[in-house]
Amino acid sequence: MGVFEDSVSTFLRPIVSYLEDDSVSEVLVNGPDEIFIEQRGLLQKVDATFGDEQALQAAVRNIAQFVGRRIDAENPILDARLPDGSRVAAVLPPCSRKGTSLSIRKFNGGVPSFGDLIKRGSITKDAARFIDICVYLSKNIIISGGTGSGKTTLLNVIGSRIPKTQRTLVIEDSSELQIQSDHVVFFESQPPDEHGKGEVSIRDLIRSALRLRPDRIIVGEVRGSEAIDLITAMNTGHGGSMGTTHANTPVDALVRLETLAMIGGTQVPVAAIRRQIASAIHLVVQIKRMNDGSRKVVQISEVMPEVDEFGKYQVKAIFEFVQKGRNEAGEVVGEMVPTGYLPSFFREIQLNRIPFPKEKFEPPSWYIEHQKKTAA
Ligand SMILES: Nc1ncnc2c1ncn2[C@@H]1O[C@H](COP(=O)(O)OP(=O)(O)OP(=O)(O)O)[C@@H](O)[C@H]1O
Ligand SMILES: [Mg+2]
């Protein structure tokens, strides 16, 4: 059996070969005749076709049935996880205007480790080690990045570094995280039924999670009013909590959380929310899908606990990826380096006798030159 059972695969015949090919990470169908795949990080259009809209809809209905859901005119949106961890999302017309849209993000070969990410050139050993230390020291971490930049994958890796003795509650919209730890409980939100009843939101889940004695809370993706609950939890003794959010820079990630938190905490003035965010979040890890298709951690930044006199977040890059060019194969070439900024909690690293000396934060001389040039 591949991603699906044979009975479902029959309906997916036009795309089965891609689903079975480990070098393909994603299959995107934009109507019956337009199919793209992502292979080794790059999107490309392929010749396959479903023939007509009916055949495509039959395939999507079968997938829905396979995961115990339904998709029809009344519920034209499907967002589900397959038993092997792959993600399926589909939207029927007329909401989807070119015909049914379908995306299958495959879960090829389990959760990577930091070692795998280092091998792929997504992060350096020192930067990975530093994040590891932050997890150990119970820093609250937000992973920020664009669509498909590797946020969820990175959260799996980082979340799996939580010390085994700690109880972690994972909260998601549609379950996709596979945190590897000894004591993890997974929760999934629930959409309302056809009568509009029975909805359980991420907010509801965070609030009940707080009564379930968590050491840490992980929110798969913060994209709504639950931001306020996560921030409150981070500020009230659930250090070491984590989540991802959709943003292009660490500062944008904080601003986005602020906007989302405002929806959830309408009574709270923005200045107060800003202060809460600054004190709640210690670290933002920015990941990016580079234009060669690779994913790289491009910044690891500390968020200072206070906003400045103008109410602005103070964010200091600790590690940064500097692109130097491209090689003959078109791959992005660059280096991730420490910026020279010593994290405010460096003393804590020393006090805990963690072997990560001050020199690890010192940049190479070319970086100092490069900084001078860009500043000039
Ligand atoms: N470090 C990496 N190197 C190469 N490919 C990666 C890396 N991380 C993730 N990917 C691939 O990129 C795709 C998207 O990954 P992931 O789901 O983690 O991204 P995301 O940012 O959470 O996406 P979304 O915005 O949809 O939530 C997957 O196919 C995954 O296999
Ligand atoms: Mg994701």
Image (cartoon, rainbow, N blue to C red):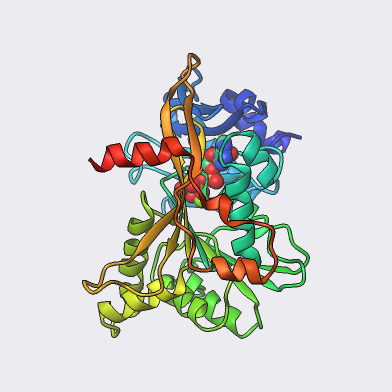
Q: Position of residue 216 (x, y in %)?
A: 62, 73
Query: Which residue is painted at 34% across and 65% down in the image?
Result: 314
- Asked whether, in this view, residue 27 is left or right of residue 275, the answer is right
Query: Which residue is painted at 39% across and 66% down in the image?
Result: 224
Q: Nearer the viewer, residue 179 or 48?
A: 179
Q: Nearer the viewer, residue 160 or 359?
A: 359
Query: Which residue is painted at 51% across and 76% down in the image?
Result: 234
- Asked whether, in this view, residue 285 is left or right of residue 155, the answer is left
Query: Which residue is painted at 66% across and 66% down in the image?
Result: 136
- Asked whether, in this view, residue 218 is left or right of residue 363, the answer is right
The residue positioned farthest toward the top in the image shown: 328
Q: In the rendered image, is residue 60 in sight?
A: no
Q: Position of residue 355 (x, y in %)?
A: 69, 58
Q: Nearer the viewer, residue 260 or 33?
A: 260
Quadrant into which the C terminus falls? top left
Quadrant into which the N terminus falls? top right
Q: In the rendered image, is residue 322 in sight?
A: yes
